[in-house]
Image (cartoon, rainbow, N blue to C red):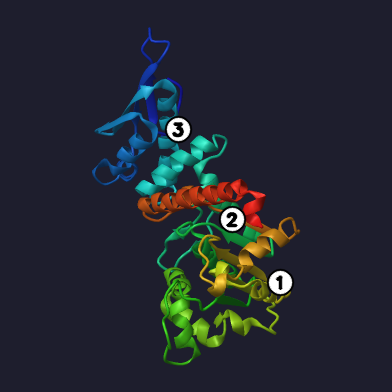
């Protein structure tokens, strides 16, 4: 047997002969490090069950060995997934069932990539020592776009990490002194309900609308440090209306809920960008709560600014959802319904006769 890296899982496989139409294969992967084995398998072998469901390969575990059985090509693929997950675990990364599913899809769709190329692109290590890094190829491209462009639009459904990763990049830039302040802003538009009068000063009135940004920030920074930065102006929270007339130099600006910005507000926001600044605009084009059917500034910007150098548009889909697995299914169901309604509407319009239009 050839020499192996002692940390590399050992694989012993054999493909039975005589079944050319549907070749079957078995393999045994030996994992010497007990801590790596436990993290790979997960509680009650939950990670192995996820891997089994994603690939169709029968997977079992006995002692320090993981046993595989299935189509020869699928078994070889699972061996690769396990080897890369083990490497990720040895390098200090936690693995959850969703991470296993994402790893399978990433390696299947991009066989030339390695998990470390995506999952180990560390954006920030939080105050709680949690590593924040991309969880898929769309997030990886999003992070790269923010690093390479002054204005980035993150467009897609809820749960894809658009605003969370933007906040992580902002905190990273601030701690590296690449910017002097973080500015968080979003429009004060209710999602289909009227909240009425909100008591308190400006910060207290705006706070309910900016709660998701606050939550992300406190997940990444010590709360006392975050509050001190807010008091010193290192982190500024402002409603969109208060951005008029200001040029933001050396700032990282996050504009959340962009679909609820009018075209005029979007123009005002984008033209306030100053030197050495980065702006990230996030939102879902299907979630527009503007009154009187007003045109969304996000859709307007997508049409007007596509192809402008220095501006990048990053699109996410339900495949990129990193919340509870049901969220992706919910997003997909709504998207399918909306697409069917659009097709039906287009068919009705196309079938209208000239006499009906007069």
> How far apart are labels 1 and 3 at the CA level?
43 Å
Q: Secondary structure at mark 1?
A: loop
Pointer 3 local density, CA inside 10 Å: few below 14, some 14–19, many at least 20: some
Residues under labels 2 and 3: Cα distance?
26 Å
Q: Give how far across and how far down residue 47 sits, in percent.
A: 32, 42
Which mark is on residue 142?
2
Q: Which residue is mark 1?
A: 276
Q: Residue at x 40, y 15 (%)?
A: 23
**SS class, disc 2:** helix
Looking at the picture, how far across and down is residue 43, in whole percent? 26, 46
Using the image, determine if residue 193 lies above or below residue 144: below
Vertical placement of residue 183 versus 42, above or below: below
Query: Between residues 294 and 33, which one lies in front from this camera angle?
Result: 294
Within-10-Å neighbours for mark 2: few <14, some 14–19, many 20+ = many
**Residue 139 against residue 263 in the figure, above or below:** above
Whether the residues at callouts 2 and 1 have beta carbons within 8 Å, the answer is no
Judge from the rendering whether residue 309 lies leftward or rightward of residue 120; answer left or right: right
Pick the quarter of the image with the C terminus. Answer: bottom right
Q: Nearer the viewer, residue 231 or 243?
A: 243
Residue at 66% x, 64% y: name it: 300
Depth check, front residue: 113 or 322: 322
Residue 119 visible (yes or no): no
Residue at image mark 3:
80
* Residue 306 picture quarter: bottom right
Q: CA distance from mark 2 to mark 1?
A: 19 Å
């Amino acid at each position: 047997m050839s020499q192996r890296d002692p940390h590399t899982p050992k694989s012993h496989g054999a493909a039975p002969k005589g079944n050319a139409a549907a070749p079957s294969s078995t393999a045994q992967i030996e994992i010497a490090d007990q801590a790596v084995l436990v993290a790979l398998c997960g509680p009650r072998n939950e990670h192995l069950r996820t891997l089994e469901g994603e690939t169709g390969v029968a997977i079992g575990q006995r002692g320090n060995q993981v046993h595989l059985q299935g189509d020869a090509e699928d078994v070889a693929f699972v061996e690769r997934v396990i080897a890369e997950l083990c490497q990720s675990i040895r390098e200090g990364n936690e693995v959850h069932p969703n991470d296993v599913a994402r790893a399978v899809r990433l390696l299947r769709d991009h066989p030339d990539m390695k998990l470390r190329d995506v999952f180990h692109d560390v954006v920030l290590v939080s105050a709680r020592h949690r590593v924040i890094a991309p969880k898929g190829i769309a997030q990886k491209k999003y992070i790269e776009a923010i690093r390479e462009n002054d204005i980035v639009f993150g467009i897609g459904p809820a749960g894809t990490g658009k605003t969370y990763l933007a906040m992580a990049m902002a905190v990273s830039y601030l701690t590296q002194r690449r910017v002097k302040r973080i500015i968080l802003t979003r429009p004060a538009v209710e999602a289909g309900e009227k909240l009425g009068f909100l008591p308190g000063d400006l910060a207290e009135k705006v706070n309910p609308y900016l709660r998701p940004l606050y939550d992300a920030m406190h997940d990444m920074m010590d709360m006392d440090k975050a509050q001190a930065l807010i008091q010193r102006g290192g982190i500024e929270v402002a409603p969109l209306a208060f951005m008029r007339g200001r040029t933001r130099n050396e700032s990282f600006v996050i504009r959340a809920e962009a679909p609820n910005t009018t075209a005029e507000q979007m123009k005002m926001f984008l033209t306030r960008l100053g030197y050495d600044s980065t702006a990230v605009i996030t939102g879902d084009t299907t979630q527009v709560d503007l009154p009187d059917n007003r045109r969304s500034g996000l859709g307007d910007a997508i049409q007007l600014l596509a192809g402008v150098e220095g501006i990048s548009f990053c699109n996410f889909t339900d495949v990129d959802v990193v919340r509870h697995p049901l969220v992706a299914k919910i997003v997909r169901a709504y998207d399918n319904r909306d697409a069917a309604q659009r097709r039906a509407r287009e068919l009705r319009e196309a079938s209208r006769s000239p006499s009906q239009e007069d």
